[in-house]
Amino acid sequence: MKTILRPLVFTGLLLLFAAGASAQSILSSVDGKRVDLDAQDGKIVVLAVGAAWLPLSEKQAGFTNALVKKYQGRPVVFYFVVTDSTNTRSKNFASDDDVKDFSVRNKISVPVLRDSDGVMMKRKYKLEQVPSFVILDRAGNASTETFGGLDPKFDLTGPISQAIDRLLSQ
């Protein structure tokens, strides 16, 4: 009995870990949809990771909108990921309405996803600061260094475009 039970338990644990690993790439949008970042059908994915409370994220929203226009009709998908906490006791708390207001105020033209306290961004992409940009290749892997620590006087769309263009040419 033990010889049968051990492999079954081991297999069950493997399945649970596999399910947990794939769930790590799923985020919810502020309009209630679920988005799996790993299931983008061979497209390049650009994640603009910011926060509604952070003034530099307003500049980041402008960069994101400019990149969306530039790559319209190409196999590139953009998401704005807010790391504001969903915990009402957190100093970085933002309700979905707060995030929606931020999105409207900054004319964000892409789906806005929530990653409360940046947990997934830190764990999966080793993100250390916001605002940042993470670019995923067609296989869903982080493809380049993270573009982080925005300088409001520097137009980051140039270096990000170069990274996207390299991936498009592969």
Image (tube, rainbow, N blue to C red):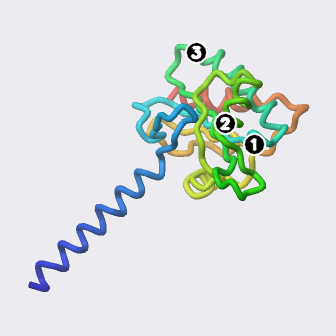
Residue under numbered circle 2: 48
Q: Which kind of residue does numbered mark 2 sit on?
A: Ala
Q: What residue lies at 67% left-to-right and 51% top-to-bottom?
A: 85
Q: Tell me where residue 55 appears, x and y as whole percent.
A: 84, 38
Cα separation, mark 3 vs mark 2, equals 16 Å
Q: What residue lies at 63% left-to-right and 38% top-to-bottom?
A: 96
Residue 139, numbered label: none
At mark 3, the secondary structure is loop
Q: Please tell me how crowded label 1 is: few (under 14), some (14-19), or many (20+) other residues with Cα within 10 Å.
A: many
Tell whether label 1 touches label 2 (CB within 8 Å): yes
Q: Residue furthest right?
A: 153
Which quadrant holds residue 89?
bottom right
Residue under numbered circle 3: 72
Residue under numbered circle 1: 131
Q: Tell me where residue 22 appears, x and y as whole percent.
A: 40, 51
At mark 1, the secondary structure is loop
Q: Please tell me how crowded label 2 is: few (under 14), some (14-19), or many (20+) other residues with Cα within 10 Å.
A: many
